Amino acid sequence: MPKIKIKRKSTIIDMTAMSDVTVLLLTFFMLTSTFVQKEPILVSAPSSVSEIKIPDTNIMQILVDKQGRVFMSLDKQEDRIAVLEAVGKEYGIVFNAKEIQKFKLANSFGVPIQKMKSFLALEQGEQDKALPTLGIPCDSTNNQFKSWVKQACLQNSDLRIAIKADQTTPYPVIKNVMNSLQDIRENRYNLITSLKTVKES
């Protein structure tokens, strides 16, 4: 009696559906995620138990490092351009189109206005190296910080101020920043902290 040959079934699995789902998920996460902006300095914020989140838009962030150097960032590019031109006008400095374009694309800034033109002339890599060593003047004799904040608030009335300082920054430095804000009647601002975990007893 002849042997019956059993027909072998194909072991190939169609992966088309799986790859479609993967591409859809990848596209979804790319479109819905928000990227963390590059900051010029590394700031270790103090801990708190507050869970209040700052808004995603219309934010002016003030960074203060351990040495007391002050940096700022504006989330809207249009605000950056208007503020640069206004502060430049206040100090008698005119910026050309190329300089304005470079400033518009910068996430953070923290340069004395007198050095801004030479700073903007640098390449991106050189700017990243130079920026952490500079900072916006915020002392009693030369308080350019007040000018930047004042002009930013004039350009955008919905602007929210958020201060992010290092936990080791001396208190007099933070007090000086807050006093500068009070001088221009900006008494409402957020303090950015990292969430502290509380152990249940």
Image (cartoon, rainbow, N blue to C red):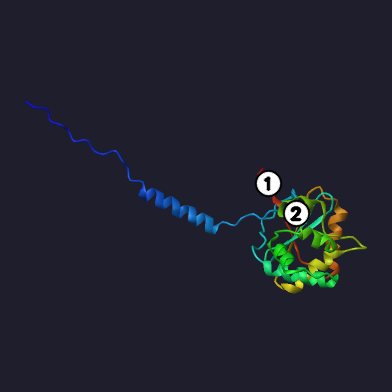
The N terminus: image quadrant: top left
Compared to residue 48, the image places residue 159 above or below, namely below
Question: Camera-side residue: 140 or 196?
Answer: 140
Query: Alpha-carbon neighbours of circle 1 within 10 Å: few (<14), some, or many (≥20)?
Result: few
- Identify the residue at horizontal 23%, vertical 38% (top origin): 9
Residue that lies at the very extreme toward the top in this rendered image = 1
Numbered mark located on residue 198 in the image:
1
Nearest-to-viewer mark from 1 and 2 = 2
Residue type of the residue flagged with mark 1: Val
Q: Which residue is mark 2?
A: 127
Query: Alpha-carbon neighbours of circle 2 within 10 Å: few (<14), some, or many (≥20)?
Result: some
Residue type of the residue flagged with mark 2: Gln
Q: Seen in the image, is 72 located left or right of residue 20?
A: right
The C terminus: image quadrant: top right
Residue that lies at the very extreme toward the left in this rendered image = 1
Can you give x and y, in whole percent of width and height, for residue 77 in the image?
A: 68, 66
How many marks do you count on the picture? 2
Separation of residues labelled 1 and 2 (CA atoms): 41 Å
Q: Earlier in the sequence, mark 1 or mark 2?
A: 2
- Secondary structure of the residue carrying tag 1 is loop
Kindly indicate whether the residue at mark 2 contacts the one at mark 1 (C-beta within 8 angstroms).
no
- Identify the residue at horizontal 81%, vertical 47% (top origin): 168
Q: Seen in the image, is 45 located left or right of residue 20?
A: right
Can you give x and y, in whole percent of width and height, for residue 141 in the image?
A: 93, 63
Question: Camera-side residue: 161 or 197?
Answer: 161
Quarter-of-image position of residue 135: bottom right
Question: Camera-side residue: 87 or 181?
Answer: 87
Can you give x and y, in whole percent of width and height, for residue 184 in the image?
A: 83, 70
Q: Is residue 152 visible?
A: no
